[in-house]
Image (cartoon, rainbow, N blue to C red):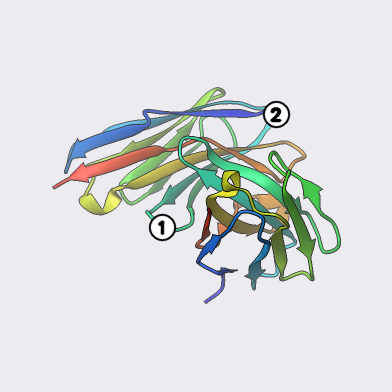
């Protein structure tokens, strides 16, 4: 089925550990995004990539890095996890200037202890 | 700065009881306003895009409308399966990024 695939679905990290969240889409979309969702704060943009080879900061980029590996894949890395990064992370993609909105993955629930 | 405010935060309705969810927004030139549905433990699912004031879109029991300052998601004769969080987002002109509201959690009681 066409869509956005995120791995892993769940992860528990200790403070200071690093990890990479993976995202892949098979809809030939140019743009990809990473959001975090926290209770009462809605979806907040971490980083986005308008095309292969380009990345830009969103609203809450501190503590994160991204890589647009190719047109299909966009990864999010936490170099030194902190409890404040406990959240649900969503990857999304869009085509044609996002006229039809985004297609979201099913999310990664990350807990940092 | 683009802003989206949704109200109410939560809404409980009896099955068959119609109501509306509100999305107020400020944006520097609206390219599009989007409605999403999100079920627990899942990613948001696209419902509608509205582009200009006066536009309406319908899907089953849902109808979305748009004015220059707000959008409404009307739900008619809801069923328990309509229970979900409904998210509103805006896209500014010349920008692909969406700014989301915090959502309305809708519960339909059988």
**Residue B3, percent across and down?**
60, 27
Q: Is residue A103 visible?
A: yes
Residue B10 found in image quarter: top left
Q: Are marks 2 and 1 on the same chain?
A: yes
Q: Chain of mark 1?
A: B
Point 29% across, 50% down: residue: B82
Left or right of B93? Residue A12 is: left
Q: Are marks 2 and 1 in contact (CB under 8 Å)?
A: no
The extreme right residue here reads A53
Q: Is residue B48 above or below residue B71?
A: below
| Number of numbered tags placed on the structure image | 2
**Residue A5, percent across and down?**
57, 70
Point 67% across, 51% down: residue: A98
Label 2, on which residue?
A: B29
First-in-chain label (2 vs 1): 2
Label 1, on which residue?
A: B41
Q: Is residue B18 visible?
A: no
The extreme bottom residue here reads A1
């Amino acid at each position: 089925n066409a869509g956005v695939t995120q791995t892993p679905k769940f992860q528990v990290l200790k403070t200071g550990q690093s990890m990479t969240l993976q995202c892949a889409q098979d809809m030939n979309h140019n743009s990809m995004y990473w959001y975090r969702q926290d209770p009462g704060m809605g979806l907040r943009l971490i980083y986005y990539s308008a095309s292969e080879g380009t990345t830009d900061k969103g609203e809450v980029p501190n503590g994160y890095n991204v890589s647009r590996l190719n047109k299909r894949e966009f990864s999010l890395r936490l170099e030194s996890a902190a409890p404040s990064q406990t959240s649900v992370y969503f990857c999304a993609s869009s085509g044609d200037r996002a006229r039809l909105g985004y297609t979201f993955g099913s999310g990664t629930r990350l807990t940092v202890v | 700065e683009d802003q989206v405010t949704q109200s109410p935060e939560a809404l409980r309705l009896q099955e068959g009881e119609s109501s509306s969810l509100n999305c107020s927004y400020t944006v520097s030139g609206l390219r599009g306003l989007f409605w999403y549905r999100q079920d627990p433990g899942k990613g948001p699912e696209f419902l509608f895009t509205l582009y200009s004031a006066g536009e309406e879109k319908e899907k089953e029991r849902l109808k979305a409308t748009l004015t220059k300052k707000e959008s409404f998601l009307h739900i008619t004769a809801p069923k328990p399966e309509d229970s979900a969080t409904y998210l509103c987002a805006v896209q500014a002109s010349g920008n692909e990024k969406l700014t989301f509201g915090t959502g309305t959690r809708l519960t339909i009681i059988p």
